[in-house]
Structures are given as structure tokens and as C-alpha cells.
Amino acid sequence: MPDAKPKALIVGASRGLGLAMVEEYLSRGWDVVGTVRGSGRTGLHDLKDKHGASLQIETVDIAEQDQIAALREKLAGQTFDLLFVNSGVANGPDEAVRNVSTDEFIRVMVTNALGPMRVIEELDDLVTPTGTIGVMSSGLGSVADNEDGGWEVYRGSKAALNTFMRSYAAEHRKDGRSLVIISPGWVRTDMGGPHATLDVSESIPRVVDVITAQSGKRGLSYLNYQGKSVRW
């Protein structure tokens, strides 16, 4: 009897980097569960038409704690070799701490830092004991590399995500799973904008290569799409 196909759960997969990750894993022979936030048709549904049973689509808004719990209940009984949280938003690059509204600050922080960690805390028991848990962060989340300023709120949210992941790793230091924080580079997506330096096709296959290379390596790594360590 052939071995079962590896399986990934990718949260935040309706477009951009998350959608490209789903497509990449499907092309490598994985089964994938990808999530969308709303009820409208997305690029993920187009992939479903193409790949059929290899792709399962679920709905979750990671800013809503009850929806994360509902997703956990829906996926009960499934196991995953990879849980990857891609969900993220940006605010304006010139919208600094001094002038950002409280509501906008909360939106960015909840979506980029609190929500992803709630997903991991709620769903980590579905990941195999030697599997991988990862998040899409950013080079802008590096405190050590912040020498130019700008993107203050977004930087802060990704730095917070990185810190939460370090805490998670410390609390699970006896865990055999690989924990990966990924900086995908500046990619031309709806969020990255048209002037970004990388195409999705230049970033995501290498991101998946990096995640794959970390498989079986317990503990936390903060890496860019080229597999190089990013300074904390």
C-alpha cells in the first residue's frame, strides 16, 4: 500500500502569497486544506476546480476567536505535516504611531500577530509530532535590521509575531516539531504593490524549499526566502 500523501493546512490562502503556496504544494503532490475569510469566490476556488479532492477549502477569519475554534472542530480527526499561517494586512507606509487611529492599530496587530498565534495555539495538536509549524512574517519584523524606520505599525506587528513565536518555541522546547518564521522578500502582490522587487514565482517556490529543508529540525528558525537567517 503506497504511503499517504503529505498534507498541509495553509491559513490565509485566498490570494497572493498564500494562494501561491497552496498551488506550489499541490504541484509537489501534497494534499492541502486552504482557508478563505469570506463566502465569495476566490482564486482558491479556481484551484479547487483544477485539483479536485486534493484541495479542501475552509472558512475562517482569524480576527474572530470563535471562528478559529470552529475551524478546529471542523478539522478534528485530520492530521497535518505542515500548518502555515499566512494571514496578514498592511496599513499605509506613512501612517506612523503618532497618527494611526486606535482602530487601525488594533486591526493590524490582531490580524498580523494575535490571530496567527491563536490559530497555532488552537490547531497545533493537529500537526504530526515531527511536522512543521510556520508563519509568514517579514524582514521588516527584524528589530536588529530596522535602520531606516518607516512602516512603523506593520513593523511592530511582525516584530510582535516573531516575539510570540519565540515564546511559543520556549514553551514547547521539548517538542520535536520544526518552527519556521519566513520572510518572503518584497513581493509584487496586492499588499506588496507593483514596485516590489520579486514576482510571486520568484519567492514562493523558494519559500517552500526553505520550509521543506527545515523539516525534521526541531526548534525555531527565522529565515528568508533564500534560506538565510534573519537577524532578530
Image (spheres, rainbow, N blue to C red):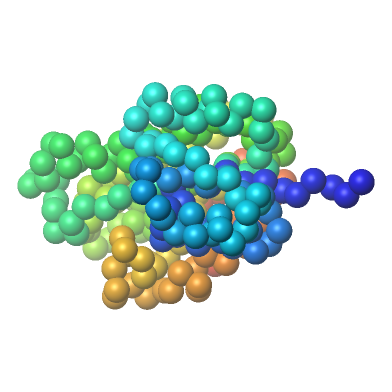
Q: Is residue 160 visible?
A: no
Quadrant position of residue 144: bottom left
x, y percent for residue 163: 41, 39
Left or right: residue 147 compared with residue 127: left
- In the rendered view, would you say 23 is above or below 1? below
Quadrant position of residue 147: bottom left
Looking at the picture, tell me which residue is in the foreground, 144 or 38.
Answer: 38
Left or right: residue 212 compared with residue 57: right
Kindly identify the residue that appears in the image at 19 percent across and 40 percent down.
105
Q: Residue furthest right?
A: 1
Looking at the picture, tell me which residue is in the foreground, 23 or 107.
Answer: 23
Kindly identify the residue that appears in the image at 14 percent across and 58 percent down.
94
x, y percent for residue 225: 52, 64
x, y percent for residue 36: 43, 45
x, y percent for residue 207: 55, 61
- In the rendered view, would you say 129 is above or below 99? above
Kindly identify the residue that appears in the image at 37 percent across and 43 percent down.
39
